[in-house]
Image (cartoon, rainbow, N blue to C red):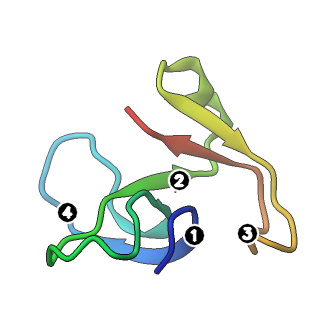
Amino acid sequence: MKLGDIYLVALPQIGGREQMGKRPAIILQEEDFKLPTVLIVPLTTKIRALDFAGTILIQPDDKNHLDKESVALAF
């Protein structure tokens, strides 16, 4: 895994309003980070999420392999 890569991840249901289920997420840590955890930012195709602070629109392209416009939920 490298910083900025997008992977399909399975986020567990914990309760509340957080993102869950299978969805793309951006890797936000250097690959030489040796802890057994990975820092990610989940994505959603719900464009209205841009109304919230801490979100970024990502356009699909050949490099990220997304098939729809997605919003990074960095909050």
Q: Which residue is mark 3?
A: 64
**CB of mark 3 within 8 Å of CB of mark 4?**
no
For marks 1 and 4, the one nearer the N-term is 1
Q: Secondary structure at mark 3?
A: loop
The residue that appears at 87% across and 74% down in the rendered structure is 62
**CB of mark 1 within 8 Å of CB of mark 2?**
yes
The residue that appears at 55% across and 44% down in the rendered structure is 72
Q: Secondary structure at mark 2?
A: strand
- Any mark on residue 27, and which? none
Instruction: Identify the image quadrant of the C terminus.
Output: top left
Which amino acid type corresponds to the residue marked 3 in the rendered image?
Asn
Q: Secondary structure at mark 1?
A: strand
The residue carrying pointer 2 sits among few (fewer than 14), some (14 to 19) or many (20 or more) residues within 10 Å by Cα, namely many
> In the visual, does 64 lie left or right of 14?
right
- How far apart are the alpha carbons under marks 1 and 2? 9 Å
**CB of mark 3 within 8 Å of CB of mark 1?**
yes
Which amino acid type corresponds to the residue marked 2 in the rendered image?
Leu
- Judged by depth in the image, the label closer to the viewer, 3 or 2, is 3
Q: Which residue is mark 4?
A: 13
For marks 3 and 4, the one nearer the N-term is 4
- Judged by depth in the image, the label closer to the viewer, 4 or 2, is 2
Give percent across and percent down for residue 54: 47, 26
Question: Which residue lies most toward the front here?
Answer: 32
Q: Which residue is mark 2?
A: 43
- How far apart are the alpha carbons under marks 3 and 4? 26 Å
The residue that appears at 73% across and 69% down in the rendered structure is 64
Q: Which residue is mark 1?
A: 6
